[in-house]
Amino acid sequence: MDDRFPQPQRIEASRPWGPSAIAAAAVLAALIAAPPVDAATHHPRAHRSAEEVASRAAGDPIMAIVSLKSQRVTIYDADGWILRAPVSSGMHGRETPAGVFSVIQKDKDHHSNLYDDAYMPNMLRITWSGIALHGGPLPGHAASHGCVRMPYAFAEQLFPEAKVGMRVIIAPHDVTPVDITHPVLFSPKPDAEAQAKALAATAADVAKAADTARLASVTATRDAARASAAVHRLEILKTSADGQFAAAARADDAATSEDAKAHTAIAKQKAAAAVADLQTQFDAATADAKTKQDAVMPAREAAAAAETKRADAAKAAREAAPARISVFISRKKQRLYVRHGFEPVFDVPVTIRDSDQPIGTHVYTAVARTDAGFRWTAVTVDGAGGADGSAKSALDRITIPPDVLDRIASNAAVGSSLIVSDEGLSSETGKGTEFVAVLSDQPQGGLAMRHHPTTDGVRYARQRNYWDADNGYQSPRVYYYPQQRSFFGGWSSW
């Protein structure tokens, strides 16, 4: 494995994200100037007092690593670190849990539902039970109730760039990503992109055909209705004409003089002609209405069949489209789990050599596309396993069935990840989350004090709060008055 990520250097100017790079760097330098040399010499925490920004242009952030030992957060893109800042994690008894998380919600103007409406700006939530990264005061040591406080200016700069789904690793010690290659680390099939494009084109064609069939069905139904209405109108006119003919016939029979008979005969003849003409129109309209009515059902059936084809084609295209796939392998459960878009896909048994021995907790991320597939990085959160506790030795012990590996790799995209851990899935893993793994041998006071959601997302009530499968933790005040604060929060008093 190669360490592609250079050590950071504090600088006065930088290019963070987008066109406003120079302005953002200038603001950052003005707000958070480095401490004097004598302060750095005499104060044990002075070297962590200022943010650092990489001198190169930054890409999209894909990972945040929080070191509990150094009280520092580092943001990485595909090529290395891009931002770094001091933090304040959970105090003794309410420690920030070490483990693997991801951003599951963002709130620019968040207020705590647990701590007296405390202001937590630029909040990046990583558990529904209330652990988050956010702007806050930094006293120079761990002081929060479980969250990770970041400098206010740093949190404001990071917030618009951090996407929901960004990996967040909270490590007991200082760890960094390193490049790694291994057969277990999946790569997309060579023809996967072409196949995905072909299926997408097919889905588009099928969708157009379905729209055409639906329009034909609507048109057939409308035409049949209009034809039936025309028959009904002609039926009324014909009934009226029949009545007029009958009246003319009676008048003709009652006529006594030659002049009267001549007059009634002409009226009778006109009435008879009108009846005959309307009868012809009625017969033609009836035949036309029957033809159009007979066409309705086939058109509807064709539209239904086309709609089914549309759904099938869209599903095939969706499943083949490149996607960020997340895989979790638990030594504790001897199982492999797959998620896509915060939703479970499937899980299967997996073979781990020396399964009674620790394997550590490692996070592997596909950070870029290459000619051979993906470029992967590895972060060893807790290197307790293998001969040397390394990310490579952990992979050496894992055997994934080829068909499962093919299924995972079939449409994996940049950003896909693999987590290998001694731990099972945390109870924080559920609806609307990525995989969450918490290191069981590390303090978890900040997490233990909170009720956890159930893994299947079932709604249940507690005295002080309840878990909502759609919206996360809710308090009665927030539930009944959601416009006051965020739907998502920890506990709150009645």
Image: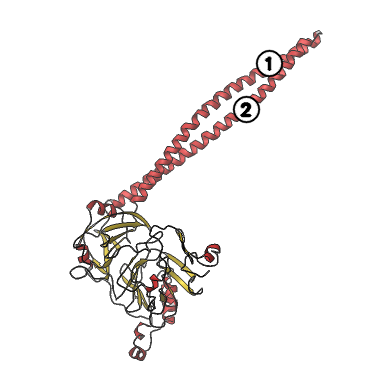
Q: Where is residue 60 in the image (x, y as percent from the top left)?
A: 37, 66
Q: Where is residue 13 in the image (x, y as percent from the top left)?
A: 38, 78
- Along the line of sight, which residue is nearer the eye, 454 or 163? 454
Q: Residue at x 55, y 62 (%)?
A: 480
- Is residue 413 toward the left or the right of residue 30 in the image? left
Mark 2: amino acid: His
Mark 1: amino acid: Ala
Q: Position of residue 72 (x, y in %)?
A: 35, 77
Query: Does dot 2 land on a helix, a strand or a loop?
Result: helix
Q: Residue at x 71, y 19 (%)?
A: 243
Question: Tag 1: Cα neighbours inside 10 Å, few (<14), some, or many (≥20)?
Answer: some
The answer for how far apart the CA atoms under marks 1 and 2 are is 21 Å
- Along the line of sight, which residue is nearer the eye, 52 or 334? 334
- Along the line of sight, which residue is nearer the eye, 194 or 154? 154
Residue 427 seen in the figure: yes
In this figure, which residue is indicated by the disc labeled 2?
232
Task: Return the disc, 1 or 2, that comes first in the chain's sequence.
Answer: 2
Residue 272 image label: 1
Question: Tag 2: Cα neighbours inside 10 Å, few (<14), some, or many (≥20)?
Answer: some
Query: Does dot 1 land on a helix, a strand or a loop?
Result: helix
395, above or below 262, in the image: below
